[in-house]
Image (cartoon, rainbow, N blue to C red):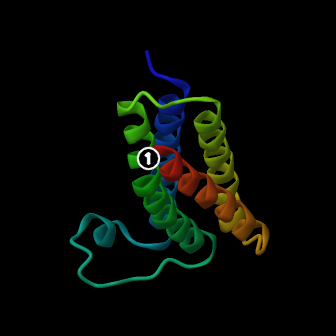
């Protein structure tokens, strides 16, 4: 059975997957299918909300690359406790809030929730040491 921290990691993975689908759907509204199905050698830039969604997705993938190792190390060490669970919950809530904050250009709030998620990730690494 998964621990709660591992469930949070899985939930975040699903959030990133849903974000990929949303970004791909948005890209289909701005680019023709020939471009989307091709090699994309020609660099095109998404605009507006779809462009912000693409940038939020890139940030979310980076966040996953940082979050997952800390959770997996803690799991391997059987070091989950109330503090690690709280840090994972803060991370997930922050990342869930981050996506619409970025897409809808909520300047300030976006930075605040990003910082909360990043701080939670750093806390997990410190707890894993």
**Front residue (pair 31, 115):** 115
- Position of residue 63 in the picture relative to residue 32 (left or right): right
Question: As drawn, is 81 to the left or to the right of 33?
Answer: right
Residue 65, position as x, y percentages in the image: 40, 56
Residue indicated by mark 1: 70
User: Which residue: 62% across, 59% down?
Assistant: 119
Which residue appears at 47% of the width and 31% of the height?
79
Classify 10 Å Cα crowding around label 1: few (below 14), some (14-19), many (20 and above): many
Q: As rendered, which of 21 and 83 lies closer to the eye?
A: 83
Q: Which residue is pictured at 62% across the width and 48% down the height?
A: 91
Evaluate whether residue 104 shows in this view: no
Pinpoint residue 19: horizontal percent, then vertical percent.
Answer: 51, 52
- Asked if 10 appears above or below 62 in the picture, the reply is above
Figure check: 114 above or below 21: below
Q: Quadrant of residue 35?
A: bottom left
Q: Position of residue 50 (x, y in %)?
A: 56, 69
Horizontal side of 123 relative to 93 (left or right) equals left
Indicate the position of residue 15 as horizontal and vertical percent values: 53, 44
Q: Please state which of residues 99 and 119 is positioned toward the viewer in this rendering.
A: 119
Which of 7/78 is in front? 78
Give the left or right position of residue 34, taking residue 92 as reference: left
């Amino acid at each position: 059975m998964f621990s709660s921290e591992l469930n949070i990691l899985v939930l975040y993975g699903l959030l990133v997957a849903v974000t990929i689908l949303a970004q791909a759907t948005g890209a289909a509204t701005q680019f023709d299918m020939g471009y989307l199905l091709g090699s994309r050698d020609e660099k095109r830039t998404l605009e507006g909300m779809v462009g912000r969604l693409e940038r939020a997705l890139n940030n979310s993938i980076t966040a996953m690359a940082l979050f997952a190792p800390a959770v997996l190390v803690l799991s391997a060490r059987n070091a989950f406790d109330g503090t690690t669970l709280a840090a994972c919950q803060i991370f997930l809530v922050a990342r869930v809030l981050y996506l619409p904050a970025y897409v809808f250009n909520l300047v300030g709030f976006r930075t605040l929730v990003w910082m909360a998620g990043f701080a939670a990730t750093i806390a997990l690494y410190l707890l894993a040491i």
